[in-house]
Image (cartoon, rainbow, N blue to C red):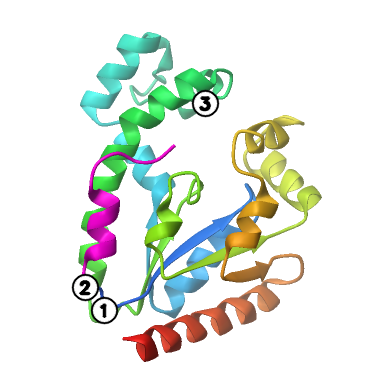
């Protein structure tokens, strides 16, 4: 499940002056929290989920989805209902692949633009790719390092049921459609253990941030 076109290789070949870091982890592991800390430390964060949410409401995309699945995929405000689309694609892998083939190239173009903007910003010290499908879409291959955010399953389950109102069993069902977490963890360069306090998580992130920036500077 790779993104089409030369966009991935375009990033890899570019003469970058800042480390490009992938952020991975299980659903509900706290990646957004880690991304926020990295941003506070001076990283420019590219949120693939946010880009996807913007692109799914692009008029061309919205028209395509209505043609595929009917106007029922639209919410009362006229925007695409992510809940309704999610119910379709997570019930049928072929529809999920269809949606990904539509959205991923569009997201890739936006990602290229954001990398360029962060590269040109002297206040940014690191560029972070926060993507739920970092490994599945081969984005890890263009990264100088990957941070994996780990958290116990029960903590993650409680978090998504509380914050996202997911029914029992939904977390396990969705993660079965992705690469196993132990494989992702094994491939990462740094591990953030999100199983204690926010202060402890921040200490880990600060240490990793400093180490990556230093090592990237020495390798140039």
Quadrant of the rendering where the C terminus is positioned: bottom left
Residue 202's place in the image compared with 50, above or below, is below
Rate crowding at label 2 as few (under 14), some (14 to 19) or many (20 or more) other CA atoms within 10 Å: few
**Range drawn in magenta:** 1-15
**Labels 3 and 1: the sequence-earlier one:** 1
Residue that label 1 marks:
17
Residue 88's place in the image compared with 58, above or below, is above
> What's the CA distance linking mark 1 and mark 2?
7 Å
Q: Residue at x 41, y 58 (%)?
A: 141
The nearer-to-camera label among 3 and 1 is: 1
Side of 95 relative to 172 (left or right): left
Residue that label 3 marks:
86
Q: Are marks 1 and 2 in contact (CB under 8 Å)?
A: yes
Residue 84 visible in rendering: no
Give how far across and how far down residue 80 sits, in percent. Answer: 38, 25
Residue 218, numbered label: none
Q: Residue at x 49, y 86 (%)?
A: 210
Side of 21 relative to 63 (left or right): right
Please tell me whether mark 3 sits on a helix, a strand or a loop: helix
Residue 76's place in the image compared with 211, above or below, is above
Residue 15, numbered label: 2
Q: Residue at x 43, y 71 (%)?
A: 39
Give how far across and how far down residue 121 sits, in percent. Answer: 22, 75
Q: Residue at x 65, y 73 (%)?
A: 201
Side of 38 relative to 102 (left or right): right
Is residue 170 located in the magenta-colored stretch of the structure?
no
**Labels 2 and 3: the sequence-earlier one:** 2
Residue 122 visible in rendering: yes
């Amino acid at each position: 499940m790779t993104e089409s076109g030369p966009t991935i290789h375009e990033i890899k070949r570019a003469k970058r002056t800042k480390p490009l870091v992938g952020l991975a982890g299980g659903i509900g592991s706290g990646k957004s929290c880690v991304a926020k800390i990295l941003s506070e430390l001076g990283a420019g964060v590219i949120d693939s989920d946010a880009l996807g949410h913007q692109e799914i409401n692009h008029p061309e995309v919205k028209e395509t989805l209505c043609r595929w699945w009917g106007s029922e995929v639209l919410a009362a405000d006229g925007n695409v209902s992510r809940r309704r689309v999610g119910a379709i694609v997570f019930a049928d892998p072929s529809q999920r692949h269809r949606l990904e083939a539509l959205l991923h190239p569009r997201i890739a173009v936006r990602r290229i633009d954001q990398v360029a903007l962060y590269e040109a910003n002297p206040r940014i010290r690191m560029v972070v790719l926060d993507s739920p499908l970092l490994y599945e879409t081969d984005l890890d291959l263009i990264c100088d390092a990957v941070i994996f955010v780990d958290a116990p399953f029960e903590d993650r389950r409680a978090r998504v049921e509380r914050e996202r109102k997911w029914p029992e069993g939904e977390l396990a069902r969705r993660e079965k459609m992705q690469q196993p977490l132990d494989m992702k963890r094994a491939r990462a360069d740094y591990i953030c253990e999100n199983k204690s306090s926010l202060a402890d998580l921040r200490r880990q992130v600060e240490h990793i941030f400093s180490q990556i920036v230093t090592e990237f500077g020495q390798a140039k």
